[in-house]
Image: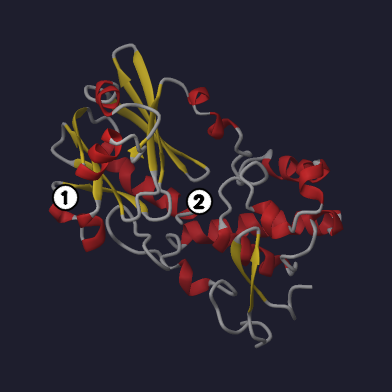
Amino acid sequence: MPELPEVEHVKRGIVPHVIGQRIIDVTFSNKVIEGKATGKETIIKGISLEAFKMNTIGYTIEDVTRRSKYLLYKLKNENHERTLIAHLGMAGGFFVASKIEDIVIANYRKHWHVVFHLNNGLKLIYSDIRRFGEIRNVAMLTDYPSINEIAPEPFSDEAEAHYLSQFAHKKYQKMPIKQMILEHRVIAGCGNIYACEALFDAKINPHTPANALTVVQRQAVFRSVVKVLDMGIQSGGTSISDYVHADGQRGTMQNNLKVYKQKTCSSCGSAITTAMIGGRNTHYCEHCQH
């Protein structure tokens, strides 16, 4: 699943081509059309395809921002404002091209689902191999409560204080720290790969109950999360499975991973242990992470 660094790079690849452009048409794939016709929310969620088009065509893309793992497209048409809220799911991606055939990755070329036709002749294309992603069109962000529940961005001044305050909540106190930092109400945008890497960096066993950590350890975990997320951004994200940039290029963070899907620890040479924590595959070094 694309995590914060990957979504940040998708955003950066889109911005130069779409800001200030008017959406002159929207095209849906047969899968999206058939899904809606049979009562399924396929990609386009919380709104009919007709209403989606009515609230998108003729609007100008004024800005594209990232909130945790979501992309937010700010649209404006005269005095009317809308926001497209997009989540890439497990294997979604946005591409900018003159035509669908120009997408360099065959699977993404084949599995396109929404095309926004722009007045500069380019197309903003959403492709999704597994169709777990979503795009919503809302009048206000408050229309989608999940956005409002997300913790402050991890690089913001208030993020650490917010994170530390969450340890007082009863529901987190006995939760394994690995599971806790995956909660978007605790830290925004920290997904499975980066959670494993952060706990290795902080030398904390992922099974450790949250309330067993000292204040210093809690701070170390947060700072390691920020460190590995920043490293992920600098490396263009992690391309282990399906993730690619908006131009089809791959990230290189996978070359820097210490424990995630690794066989031996780069620090001590011990075998990496794999366990399920909170339903997620977790990789760690029992020797280095106490």
The scheme the figure's colours follow is secondary structure
Decide which of tag 1 and tag 2 comes sooner along the chain.
2
In the picture, which quadrant includes the C terminus?
Answer: bottom right
Q: At 69% across and 86% down in the image, what residue appears?
A: 268
Q: At 75% across and 41% down in the image, what residue appears?
A: 161
Left or right: 88, with 220 as reference point: left
Q: In terms of depth relative to the viewer, which is nearer, 70 or 273?
A: 273
In the drawing, what numbered circle is on residue 75?
Answer: none
**Cα distance between the residues tagged 1 and 2:** 26 Å
Q: Is residue 75 above or below residue 277?
A: above
Residue 163 screen position, x and y as percent: 72, 45
Task: Identify the residue at the far bottom of this view.
Answer: 269
Q: In terms of depth relative to the viewer, which is nearer, 239 or 234?
A: 239
Residue 178 screen position, x and y as percent: 68, 59
How packed mark 1 is, by other alpha carbons closer than 10 Å (few <14, some 14-19, many 20 or more), is: some
Q: Is residue 93 above or below residue 54?
A: below
Check if mark 1's residue and mark 2's residue have beta carbons within 8 Å: no
Kind of element beneath mark 2: helix
Q: Which quadrant would residue 25 be assigned to in this image?
A: top left
Query: Label 2: which residue?
Result: 4
Q: In terms of depth relative to the viewer, which is nearer, 89 or 151?
A: 89
Q: In terms of depth relative to the viewer, which is nearer, 11 or 46?
A: 46
Left or right: 237, with 20 as reference point: right
Residue 123 screen position, x and y as percent: 19, 41
- Residue 184 visible? The answer is yes
Q: Amino acid at mark 2?
A: Leu
Residue 154 screen position, x and y as percent: 61, 46
- Residue 105 visible? The answer is no
How packed mark 2 is, by other alpha carbons closer than 10 Å (few <14, some 14-19, many 20 or more), is: many
Query: Label 1: which residue?
Result: 100
Left or right: 166, with 227 as reference point: right
